[in-house]
């Protein structure tokens, strides 16, 4: 373990959080410090990624070329699409770096989208293609937010769930922070040009996060399955469990992220709500959804991740039916309340899926060991499967958020075909979750399944 008193520390060669002596002698302190600083950097990354979801609400007053509904929808989803494409590239490029260097590089890269946005927003009449290019650079925030979650691997397995919740909470609150800044700007500016500071305020935030991470974080090795062989990686991608769990991540994380970011634009475009009111509703939904995500993880540990995931998907499907009815009747109050409830349910589901993924692969590893296979090989395959779902789930969550944002904001009113399409997608996820996870859990709890200890996704 490295010396925490030294500002610039070399890369650690040994980290064994499972060793109780190592953990108590200082490992706990170092891991917590790195987790909190990484969460700060993840917060900055998510805030930069979400920045354009707020800026588009002001563009009709400040930049006529981006006043159309199609243009604002494009600017909303471009950072999400760019982030989904950039995330695997960044993971490969930064794979060999330690925790500190990886976090510093990912955070420092946020200076480009922030400074570019500040420059472009002060020039009314800029062509739409140039604004889209600048918005695409904000996708770098996805890599910074994802980098923060890797620090959970520094903790013992029993504590990784809580560490992951802390890391994701920092990122989830990034969207809420920029929405809060938008509310303040909307009230103070009243349509004036001072809303540009929504982007400018990120300059000191990014600089502070990068400098503090460089001075106080450690270059600790983080294992995430990257060292697995190429053959193991290809076999994991052929695993139907990887794709099925990634689909559940797309439904829950994508709805939570995309719904929270698109909510303000949906209310303004579809119902003509003022910008401050639209942003206030979006801020409330994002905060409640961020609070629900760790609650989903806790409920999954108590009631079973499969049951909580299934309940959240059923609730999201029912809420989508009500949203379609409210949109058809123009009932803005009902629509806003139910949309908030759907985002909260998606947050609960995202937390439950975060527990479900490692539990499924751990159960597979346990079954392989009972069948006589090598324990080290079984656990390596389990870690590889979890890592692949994490990578696919992160990208699919961003893609799902972009799809939801585009479908709900691209027309003058919340499009009924888009809502019915979401309903069909949620129904598909329910049909996957029930037979593959929830029904097996119910059978084992009632004693009709194969013998063996209960695993986290099937507790009753």
Image: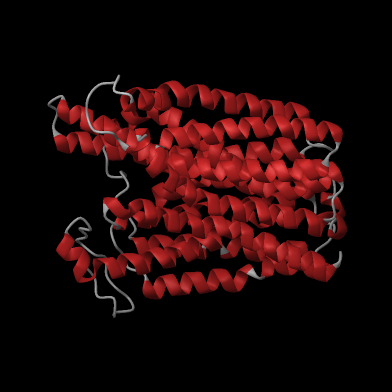
Residue at image coords 46%, 24%? 434
280 lies above or below 332: below
Q: Residue at x 48, y 23 (%)?
A: 432
The image quarter containing residue 101 is bottom left
Relative to residue 27, is residue 74 drawn left or right?
right
- If the image is split into quadrants, where does the C terminus sit? top left
Who is closer to the viewer here, 34 or 143?
A: 34
Looking at the picture, tell me which residue is in the foreground, 411 or 248: 248
Task: Judge left or right: residue 429 versus residue 363.
Answer: right
State the image coordinates of residue 72 (x, y, percent, origin top left).
77, 47
Query: x and y percent of residue 210 in the render?
Result: 48, 70
Image quadrant assignment for residue 194: bottom right
Residue projecting furthest to the front:
446
Q: For residue 208, say whether it is visible.
A: yes
Indicate left or right for 401 with 354 as reference. right
Query: Toward which corner of the image does residue 326 lie, by quadrant?
Result: top right
Percent position of residue 319, x then y: 67, 34
Tell me which residue sits at (54%, 50%) in the image.
292
Q: Is residue 9 above or below residue 157?
A: below
């Amino acid at each position: 373990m490295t010396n925490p008193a030294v500002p610039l520390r070399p890369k650690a060669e040994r980290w064994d959080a499972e060793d109780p002596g190592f953990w108590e002698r200082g490992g706990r302190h170092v891991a917590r410090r790195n987790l909190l600083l990484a969460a700060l950097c993840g917060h900055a990354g998510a805030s930069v990624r979400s920045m354009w979801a707020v800026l588009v609400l002001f563009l009709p007053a400040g930049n006529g070329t981006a006043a159309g509904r199609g243009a604002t929808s494009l600017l909303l989803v471009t950072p999400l699409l760019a982030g989904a494409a950039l995330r695997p590239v960044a993971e490969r490029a930064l794979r060999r770096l330690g925790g500190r260097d990886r976090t510093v590089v990912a955070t420092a890269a946020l200076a480009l989208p922030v400074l570019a946005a500040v420059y472009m927003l002060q020039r009314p009449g800029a062509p739409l293609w140039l604004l889209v290019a600048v918005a695409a650079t904000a996708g770098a925030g996805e890599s910074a937010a994802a980098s923060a979650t890797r620090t959970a691997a520094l903790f013992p397995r029993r504590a990784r769930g809580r560490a992951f919740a802390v890391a994701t909470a920092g990122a989830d609150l990034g969207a809420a922070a920029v929405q809060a800044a938008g509310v303040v700007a909307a009230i103070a500016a009243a349509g004036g040009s001072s809303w540009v500071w929504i982007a400018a305020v990120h300059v000191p935030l990014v600089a502070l996060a990068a400098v503090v991470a460089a001075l106080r974080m450690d270059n600790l090795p983080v294992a995430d399955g990257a060292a697995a062989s190429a053959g193991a990686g290809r076999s994991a991608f052929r695993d139907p469990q990887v794709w099925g769990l990634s689909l559940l991540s797309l439904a829950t994380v994508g709805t939570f992220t995309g719904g929270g970011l698109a909510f303000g634009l949906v209310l303004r475009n579809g119902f003509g709500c003022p910008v401050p009111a639209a942003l206030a509703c979006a801020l409330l939904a994002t905060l409640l959804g961020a609070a629900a995500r760790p609650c989903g993880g806790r409920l999954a540990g108590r009631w079973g991740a499969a049951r909580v995931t299934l309940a959240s998907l059923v609730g999201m499907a029912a809420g989508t039916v009500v949203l379609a009815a409210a949109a058809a009747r123009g009932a803005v109050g009902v629509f806003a309340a139910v949309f908030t409830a759907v985002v909260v349910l998606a947050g609960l589901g995202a937390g439950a899926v975060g527990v479900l993924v490692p539990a499924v692969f751990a159960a597979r590893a346990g079954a392989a060991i009972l069948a006589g296979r090598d324990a080290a090989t079984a656990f390596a395959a389990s870690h590889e499967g979890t890592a692949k779902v994490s990578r696919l789930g992160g990208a699919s969550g961003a893609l799902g958020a972009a799809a939801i944002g585009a479908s709900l904001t691209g027309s003058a009113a919340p499009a009924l075909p888009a809502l019915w399409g979401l309903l069909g997608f949620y129904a598909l996820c329910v049909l996957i979750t029930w037979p593959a996870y929830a029904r097996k859990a119910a059978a084992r709890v009632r004693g009709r399944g194969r013998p063996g200890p209960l695993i986290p996704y099937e507790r009753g």
